[in-house]
Amino acid sequence: MKKLFALILLIGFTATSQTIDFKLYDDFLKKHVTENGVVDYDKVLKNMGQLNLIVSNFSKISPNKSWTKSEIKTFWINVYNANVIKLFAENYPLKSINYIRDPFQMKFIAFDGDKISLEYIQNDILKVLDDPRVHFALYTTAISSPKLKNSAYSSDTIENVLNLITNEYINDPSKNNITAKNCALSKIFEWNITDFMGNNTIVSFINKYSNVRINDETKIGFMEYNWNLYKEIK
C-alpha cells in the first residue's frame, strides 16, 4: 500500500483535474456537530445515508502530484474525521471507541480499489507530509481528542487553521498542563514524539504555540489519554 500511494503521487494529473467539493460534508458537520466539537450521534444515526454518501464520494478521489500539500492535508483530514464519525455511529451507543476491536487498525475505508485504515491515513499518508500540526486536526471521539471542527477543512484556509487549532489544543489545561518547571503533555506528543522533535528536543515546538515558555531543564511527562466519548455534560 505504501508503494501504491507513492505511485499515485508520482503519476500526476491527466488533462482533466478533479474538483474537490466539501459542501455536503460541511453541511453535515454543521447539522450534527456543536461549536464545542460534540457530535450528536443520535442525530447522525438518523442521517446515515447522507454520511455514507459523503464517505463514498471521498473514496472515488485519488490525490496525486498536481495537488499541493495543503490540498492533500485538507482532503485526508476530512476523510479521516468523516470515517471516524461513521465507524463510531455504526457501533453506537458506546462509551468509548476502544470498545470497537482495533478501530484505528481496521481496514474499512475504501480507497483506490482497496481498503485502508485510519492508522494508515495518519502514519503512511499524513505523516510523510512532515507537518505535526495535523495531529491536532484528527478526531478520535475521545475526551482527550482534538476538537472536531463543525465545518469541513478547506485548502484555502488549512494552514492558518492548523496553527489556530494547535495553539488551542496545547493551551487547553485539560489536555496539557504546562509550567516552566514541569510539563504534563498530551499522549499525542508521546505517541508521535519524533514528529515534534526539532534539534532532538520537543521544546521548540511547544514554545512556538504555548502561552508558557519551557526550556531544556523543564521536566516533561505525559497525561493519561481519556478515551471516553466526548459529549455534552448534563
Image (cartoon, rainbow, N blue to C red):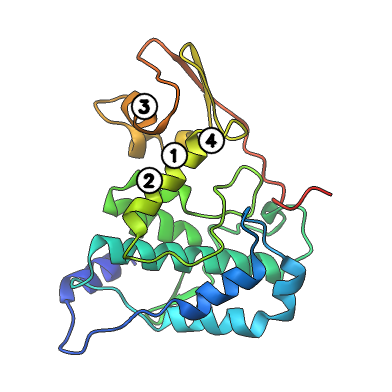
Cα separation, mark 1 vs mark 3, equals: 10 Å
* Residue highlighted by disc 2: 163
Q: Tag 3: residue type?
A: Asn
Q: Tag 1: residue type?
A: Asn
Cα separation, mark 3 vs mark 4, equals: 18 Å
Q: Is residue 139 left or right of residue 189?
A: right
Rendered view: 134 above or below 39 = above
Q: Earlier in the sequence, mark 4 or mark 1?
A: 1
* Residue highlighted by disc 4: 187
Q: Secondary structure at mark 1?
A: helix
Cα separation, mark 4 vs mark 1, equals: 16 Å
* Residue highlighted by disc 3: 207
Visible residue check, residue 89? yes
Rendered view: 38 above or below 18 = above
The structure residue drawn at horizontal position 36% and vertical position 26%, both measured from the top left corner, is: 207
* Residue highlighted by disc 1: 167
